[in-house]
Amino acid sequence: MISLTGDRVFNAQMAAPQPSSDLEQERRTAMAAERTWLAWWRTGLAATVGALGIGRLAPNLLHAAAWPYVVLGCGYAVVAVGLLIVGARRQREIEHALQTGRNAPLRFRTVGLFTAAAIALVMLTLVLVIAQT
């Protein structure tokens, strides 16, 4: 379509619209990626709360030496920082995968590292709590 001035004018009927099912699927996938990023954030914030609770509150509540709890709380804080960094990286990877049409699976190395760290922190927390009873 050409206007009176000779400039081309966009005609919505001339453009090949994407089928609504494709648009809907793309929108849902993008929203799922955003929810995943928010889950990484929530988990990082929960680990931060755990770090504060164990490192600062537990020694006062249990009337125990502070240093083991502070060290353990620092462990939770390191995991929290790792979760926030990896979550941001995953968001970037997923967005790139959506744009390029590729798959971006979470590496088992990442899963294994966080699982091992969580098991170690839980076991150390359990040992400290049992030692105080």
Image (cartoon, rainbow, N blue to C red):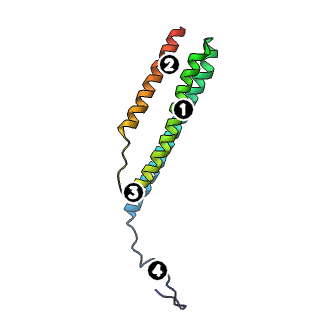
Q: Residue at x 37, y 66 (%)?
A: 19
Real-space CA distance between mark 1 and mark 4, rounded to the nearest whole angstrom: 51 Å
Q: What residue type is labelled 1?
A: Ala
* SS for dot 3: helix
For this rendering, which residue is in front, 44 or 77?
77
Residue that badge 4 annotates: 11
Q: What residue type is labelled 2?
A: Thr
Number of labels in the image equals 4
Q: Residue at x 49, y 84 (%)?
A: 8
In the image, residue 23 sits, relative to residue 1, either above or below, namely above
Name which of mark 3 and mark 4 comes first in the sequence: 4
Crowdedness near tag 2: few (<14), some (14–19) or many (≥20) residues, C-alpha within 10 Å: some
Real-space CA distance between mark 1 and mark 2, rounded to the nearest whole angstrom: 15 Å
Name which of mark 1 and mark 4 comes first in the sequence: 4
Q: Mark yes or no: residue 28 visible.
A: no
Between disc 1 and disc 2, the foreground one is: 2
Residue that badge 3 annotates: 25
Name which of mark 1 and mark 2 comes first in the sequence: 1
Name which of mark 2 and mark 3 comes first in the sequence: 3
Residue 64 falls left or right of residue 16: right
Q: Where is residue 14 in the image (x, y as percent from the top left)?
A: 41, 79
